[in-house]
Image (tube, helix red, strand yellow):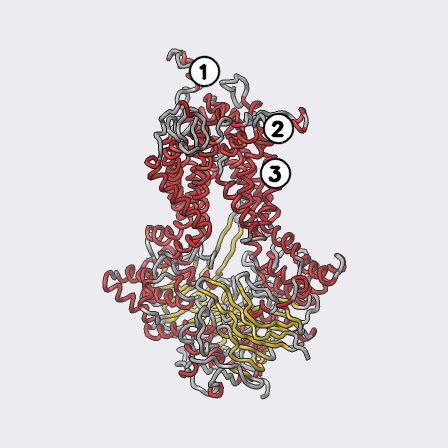
Amino acid sequence: MTPALAIERLSVGYRVRGGTLQALRDVSLTIAPGEVVGLVGESGSGKSTLAYAAVRYLAANAAIGAGRVLLAGEDLLEATPQALRQIRGRRIGMVYQDPGTALNPSLRLGEQVAELLRTHLGLDARAAEARTAELLRMVALPDPQFIMRRYPHEVSGGEKQRVLIAMAFACDPDLLVLDEPTTALDATTAAGILDLIRALQQRTGVAVLYITHDLGIVAEIAQRLAVIYAGTIVEEGPTEAVLRRPRHFYTRMLLASLPNPARIAERRRLVSFPGLPPDLRAPPAGCVFADRCPAVEAACRTAPPVLAGDAQKSACRRADIVAASDLGVRPVAAANGGGGEALLRAEGITVEYRRIGILDRLRGRPGDRVSAVSDVDLVLARGETVGLVGESGCGKSTLARALSGLVAWQGRLVFDGRPIAAAAAMDRAYRRRVQLVFQNPDQSLNPRMRIGTILSRPLRLYHALSGKALAREIAAWLDRVRLPESYARRHPHELSGGEKQRVAIARAFAADPAVVLCDEITSGLDVSIQAAILNLLMDLQAARGTTLLLISHDLNMVQHFADRIAVMYLGKLVELRPAYGMARPPFHPYSEALLAAVPVAEPGLHARAVRLHGPLPSPKNPPAGCRFHSRCPRKLGAVCEAAPPPVRTAEDDHWIRCQIPLGELAAVPPIWQREPA
Amino acid sequence: MPDWLRRLLAHPSGSVGCLLLAVALVLAVAGPSLAPFDPETFHPRRRFEGPGLEFWLGTDQFGRDLLSRLLHGARSTILFGVIATAIGTSLGAAVGLASGYAGGLIDEAVMRIMDALLAIPSLLFSLLIVTVLGGSTVNAVAAVAVTIAPGMARIARSVTLSVKSRDFVAAAVARGESHAFTMFREVLPNVAAAVVVEASIRVAFATMVGATLSYLGLGAQPPASDWGLLIAEARPHMLRNAWLVIGPGLGIATITIGFNLFGDALRDALNPRVGR
Amino acid sequence: MTLSYLVRRLGSIVVTMLLVSFVVFAITQILPGNAATMILGEFATAEAIENLSRQLGLDAPWYVQYLRWLGGVMSGDWGMSMTLSRPVLPEVLAALGRSGVLAGLSLAVVTAIAVPLGVWAAVRQGRPADMAIGGFSYLGISLPEFVTATLLLVFLVRPEIGIFPAGGYQPLAAGLGTFLIHLALPVTALAIVLTAHIVRQTRSEMVDVLQAEFVRTATLKGLPRRTVLFKHALRNALLPTVTVLALDVGYLIGGVLVVEDIFAYPGLGRLLMFAMQNRDLPMLQAGTLVMAAVYAMTNLASDLVYGVLDRRIQHA
């Protein structure tokens, strides 16, 4: 049978300063009709280039060196512009990473779907509109007529992505190219989108090329997967086989750098990758992974390995030893489980933003009041790690900013036995002891300062160092975060993302703090680098006894490192629990949904679907009673809308804020179920 | 060579702009000594000559050599825009930086005043000021500087606001740095690039306004040979010798094109988003 | 767009105009030699000047004078022209009408030429057409109006051509041809700079938009190139251009001053130049105030248009 898509020995280069960036080198990939193939790679691996090569849409500075892209046997690289137009949108549908920018901001959503139908299917305006409504219903948008009349900025990210999926399926295509369709979305929204894609694929039998960086997603949706690294496919085969017995060291290490939420009890240190991917302007002669591979031999560096094998192909000379080799993964010391001496005690912390318009002033109204953080109690014990988890807009970053005195707050704060009355009372002594690491080092490191100057600030301010002692200490801190001493003379833009974040971490720890607040510090980084950063953080903590607050949207990553987990929703803490018992009920319904939304890269392990309704309400106007009631899958009824939910204490260090009694909350089936092998 | 300078010279319009500015620099420094004749010497029998072997660009109504007059007028024509912009930019940038950094009511009040100043079209504003103070080069420079300042203040302020919202400033605040350090070491270096780019484009504008003021008799006064003034003096005779208008006109265009090209290229070169 | 936004915007215009009136008053009041000297001539006795000053209220403190003047402006009494000995307001309004014709026609010409050129240049980015348009626009923004206007005079107002008058204004009543032929050269002189500026603006917006992801979406939907360019890209590129167009009205006003002077066009610009040369204070104050008001109103209008057109802006 002719494959739906066959990419044959494709090479693509980008002309850049200093030569040609060889984004894809001799890549082949086939997708049978009706098959779902996952293409997994990190940023810069060439996976997006491959995705867009499949629709022959490449940047102006791209040049296709060699190869063919066959859609049902027809070479797209030879197609005329007109033929290409008839293929795009009709025979190939696309879904993009960021639905926020993929839709035209000045056209109504209905028109953006309908124009596609008019162009390709020749429908008249009325028929196109009727069909648009059907399509929107198909992607489970509850009120198609309403959505059709909206502009993109008026609907949520998940809804936008559903509209784009409707477009992709509109003309009943033969092939779907999905470019990280869930990456820009919150975890619970992403899980819903993935459900939808899976259901529609099964219904229509369309062939799918699914691009992602997340092995967990591939495990849930793809029958076959290809792993791409530095512009070459290093491993390819049936999903289950590759995940169970990887035959390339890159795949193996990628798997080992991911925590498995279902195996939280058997915590081990995550594998971190040494070094950086190769410079693709001058790709290595041998194996592209040689510099980072734990089992590299001299022969690996001389000749490029060939992608070989029967069903499961690998481009590793030592493919047979991959699965059995020891990556040096050690178990992590038992969590201390909290309960130690309280270092930072926050009670009833509330942060409000007020906005008063001129009309409000004229009419004497108080104006809009947004409570970003509402009445949060949290205790950080000396030396422990607390994970603070929630989706975007839940107020977790605002809480970190309040604790470091960047926004005004109300409530009570006691630090090391000393009460702090307000943000203004946070003096230099407090600021020194409570440090903040920001999400994006591009934002948090001054681009016009050298790394040495950046690191010198806490040392000068808090330790009054100068001259030689200062230079010595800067070098020592670079070393402690495993960066070469010479980096002191560089500017931030000369460093990679992971390196920049190490500098930011060094700057925080150089103050010799008791508490470090880490606000989404790995969210912009690749999986392999995330593990390295978090391992580094743990080592620094172990050496210095620092208390950590790990703020993240990624429950899976955080629970692996934290002693306790706090879950936040719309400005409120809804649950606080020890991390080691994370998989054990009772759960707050929101925590349950978050847990179930984590994609697991373990074949045969399936999460129970716990899906939330509707979009996240605006913090300007949070639902009355329990703030979660509008999306709760276990809502009891009027009582949830009327009264704020009580705090129910399950164990010493585990409480849940919910109307449902603990017994009922505990009486749920396990989140993960293993298929009998 | 710093990265941005390399990118500037590699930029096609950047290299042309740099070349034109180099020519302008030579003219401003060495213009008078390059002149083949004394600009004030009359050649009564050679009036209204077109370009020729002896008088390369021809002569005016008194038989003065046009090329020599242009070369003598170059320095003040070019320096006018540079100096007016330098003064206006420093004033405006200081106001904008302070206002944006302070924020709140101070910022609100300062920006209202800047808005009011901007609401008077700049050429009209300059004309008003020069009319009040009396026409002279110094007054014209002051007038143009005053009209440049509010626009620069707004730009500096808006860049300051966006820099202020970046996390490295939050980090400085959370660290307990002094206001002086935060403003001058953290914020200012990140505002400077945008201000410099904007200023280099404003030089072109200031040069044009300066020439216009001279043309209207409100800037440089005879017997100076500022290029705007040359065109004004040539007007009654322009049908006899069009070169008297074309020569200084092309001169002004060259300088302003140079600064425009340079400023645009500098913007691209300093903006790492473009050209990567 | 909310009512609150409208109220705030109008409020800020009022504040701005008050500040402008103060600036105008302040500048004109430090003119050397006060109004009395100007009326009586330089050889009048000190006593006569003092008497007239008292009569005119010039001995009052500056803020009283300012409030008096402002009160007059509000109630429609804009004072008497010192040189024309006629009320200022009718003169200014008549001139404003004629200037409006000139400026409006220029804007129309500019928009009609510049936007298509800018789009064309963006679509042909880096090709000869783009280079040519880019070169032209650099030249355009680099030539002051007095140079272009003078060059137009040099080359087009020659006896041997004999089509264009050297200046002046003919009302529409004198016939459409006569009316337009008198406007042709001043409009051209004004339009060159603005066209160049708007071409650059449109091109750069269009280049940005063409790189936007939603344009990629439109292309990969298999829509015809025309639809992608005009329905998806241009619509979004034009919005910022609207704002720039309004800002250019300030530029246009400056150009009007020079161009009207050169072509002896009896508009507000020429009236203002006349007032400046003769130190006619009331005329100067009135003219400046009107120009600033026009500018402020244009900016308001563009803000409102922008707000209506751009769905992404939510004025809270």
In front: mark 1 or mark 3? 3
Residue under mark 1: which chain is it in? Answer: C
The residue identified by callout 1 is C39
Q: What residue lies at 44% left-to-right and 65% top-to-bottom?
A: A519
Amino acid type at mark 3: Val
Alpha-carbon span between mark 1 and mark 3:
43 Å
Q: Secondary structure at mark 2?
A: loop
Q: Secondary structure at mark 1?
A: helix
In the displayed structure, does residue B187 sit left or right of residue A166?
A: left
Look at the picture and state if C160 lies above or below A451: above
Residue C218 x/y as whole percent:
63, 59
Looking at this view, is A228 or A612 the one in front? A228
Amino acid type at mark 2: Ile
Q: Are dots 1 and 3 in contact, CB under 8 Å?
A: no
Q: Which mark is residue A434?
A: none
Residue A654 x/y as whole percent:
47, 74
In front: mark 3 or mark 2? 2
Q: What residue lies at 40% left-to-right and 38% top-to-bottom?
A: B81
Q: Which mark is residue C163?
A: 2
Tag 1: Cα neighbours inside 10 Å, few (<14), some, or many (≥20)? some
Quick one: label 3 or label 2, which is nearer the N terminus? 3
Quarter of the figure with residue C23: top left
Q: Can see residue B223?
A: yes
